Image: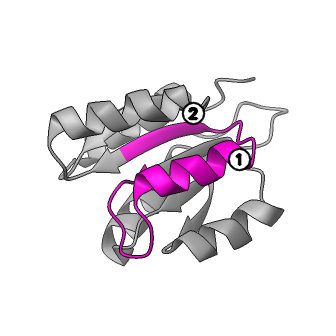
Amino acid sequence: MTAPTGTSPDRLIVVDDDAGVADFVATVARNCGYDVRVALTLNALKEVYATYAPTVIALDLTMPDADGIEVMAWLAEAKCQARIVLISGTAPDLLDAARRLGRAFGLDVAATLAKPFGLAPLAAQLRRLAFASK
């Protein structure tokens, strides 16, 4: 899938400390028509976010330098307008609680994906979110 004619591709930031997972998400996203940047740490996210206006952020909840809740709080302070896909290997009820908390922060938490996830569920979520604002 590519961006519709006359539109620019959606921009996705993948935030995951596991480079293998980040690369997988980035590859699937590119195949869905996204322009992609990867951030393996919170500091890397801050650097990328400052110069790249994402339309979607795929955010891992469990990272060594900051948990997803801290990242969502930072995104809320930054007035983030991107749609967020939370990804995590945590229990489904914790993933759901994080979704609710992100929404309480005023973020557009549009989807959740439990690890391990396959190509089809990830691609389906990304396609659903792609070009949503166009």
Is 93 drawn above or below residue 60 in the view shown?
above
Kindly identify which residue carries mark 1: 77
Asked whether the viewer can see residue 93, the reply is yes
* Residue in front for this viewpoint, 103 or 85: 103
Disc 2 to disc 1, C-alpha distance = 9 Å
Q: Quadrant of residue 113?
A: top left
Q: Quadrant of residue 19?
A: bottom left
Q: In the visual, does 44 lie left or right of 48?
A: left
User: Which residue in the protein does label 2 denote?
Assistant: 105
x, y percent for residue 55: 68, 41
When asked about the image quadrant of residue 51, the answer is: bottom right
Question: Which residue is rendered at x = 27% and y = 39% of the image?
Answer: 95
Tag 1 or tag 2, which sits nearer the N-term?
1
In the rendered structure, find residue 39 and report the number of the disc placed on it.
Answer: none
Percent x, y for residue 57? 56, 48
Element type where label 2 sits in the image: loop
What coloring was used for the rendering? one colour
In the rendered image, the quadrant that contains the C terminus is top right
Please state if 35 lies on the left or on the right of 64 as rendered: right
Q: Amino acid at mark 1?
A: Glu
Q: Quick one: label 2, few (<14), some, or many (20+) residues within 10 Å?
A: some
Indicate the position of residue 59 as horizontal and vertical percent values: 45, 52
Residue 11 in view, yes or no = no
Amino acid identity at mark 2:
Phe
Q: Is residue 72 magenta?
A: yes
Q: Is residue 69 above or below residue 63?
A: above
Question: What residue is rendered at 31% in x and 32% in y?
Answer: 97
In this rendering, the answer to whether 49 lies above or below 100 is below
Given residues 43 and 6, the one toward you in this image is 43
Q: Which segment did they paint magenta?
A: 59-86
